[in-house]
Image (cartoon, grey):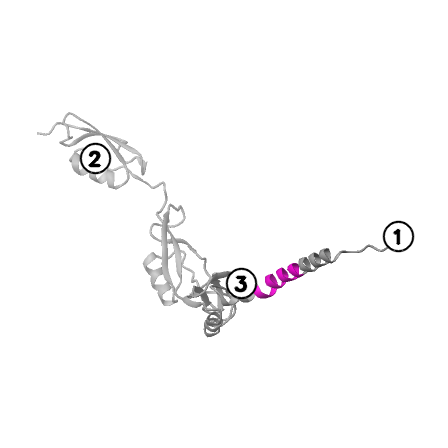
Amino acid sequence: MKGKLKISPVWAAVLIALGAFVVGVLIFNFAIMPLLVAHGDETRVPDLRLSTVPQAERLLREQGLTLTETQLGFSPDVPKGCVVSQYPPPFAIVKRNRGVRISVSSGELGVSVPELKGQSLRHAEIVLGRAGLQLGRVCQAHSGDMPPDVIISTYPGPGALVEEGGSVDMLVSLGSAHVEFMMPRLVGADIGEVKKVLESAGLLVQVDSATLPPRGRVTRQHPAYGTKIRRGAVAYLTVGRAN
């Protein structure tokens, strides 16, 4: 039979020292280090969600942090007065004395957006004010169904819940993109006045004249008097010499 393996006292001491070192590292990492982090220059941000503002201030103070900014935000899920979100986020490691921002719920219920389609912008602004809302961005677009200067749609739409004091954006009609009207009688009229009227109606004016700038009265027009013409079309005019 072979004899038992014998370990020399030197190797036994080495193994004991190595084991003690490993145990020491584990104790440092999992026991001592968290205490150092908690009481040194760094700390862990507490989870403030669903806390009230006084509770959040107390939790932050216990970790050596401060509350620097509080904002109200509409939330259908978080009770009024409780924290909805925070920055830095929960459990983040930060320097002590750092400020933390929170958003606090203004309540479960918001203001219902009224029906404003087909109303003038001025009237809609009055209705929003009475409902505790305000006018947001105003955009314009052509519409074949809505006359100019009335509301085509809103965002959020009617019936949507908005935080009290929130804004509602408007899309306002510019009227039809293809406006038709009858070509007026222009022959005999002063070219300066004619050009001003046609351009204000959205027509392009091309003048055939013997003088520059054109002066005198219109002697010929195209399209002819009574012809239907659309905005953006070209009116061709001939002008006689000025007396």
Which residue is pictured at 57% across the width and 65% down the height? 32
The secondary element bearing badge 2 is classed as loop
Question: Which of marks 2 and 1 precedes in the sequence?
Answer: 1
Screen quadrant of the C terminus: top left
For label 3, the residue is 91
In the figure, is residue 210 to the left or right of 41? left
Query: Depth check: 239 or 46 in front?
Result: 46
Q: Amino acid at mark 1?
A: Lys
Number of the label disc, if any, that sits on residue 234: none
25 magenta-colored: yes
Q: Residue at x 20, y 36 (%)?
A: 195
Task: Classify mark 2: residues with Cα within 10 Å, few (<14), some (14-19) or many (20+).
Answer: many
Q: Amino acid at mark 2?
A: Leu
Q: Answer few, some or many: residues within 10 Å of disc 3's Cα (few below 14, many 20 plus, some between 14 and 19).
A: few
Identify residue for label 1.
2
In screen coordinates, is 209 left or right of 77? left
Viewer-closest of 203 and 185: 203
| Mark pair 2, 3: CA separation | 79 Å
The x, y position of residue 196, in whole percent, is: 20, 39
Q: Amino acid at mark 3?
A: Phe
Q: Is residue 73 visible?
A: no
What residue is pinned by disc 2?
186
Q: Residue at x 15, y 25 (%)?
A: 210
Report the mark closest to the observer, 1 or 2. 1
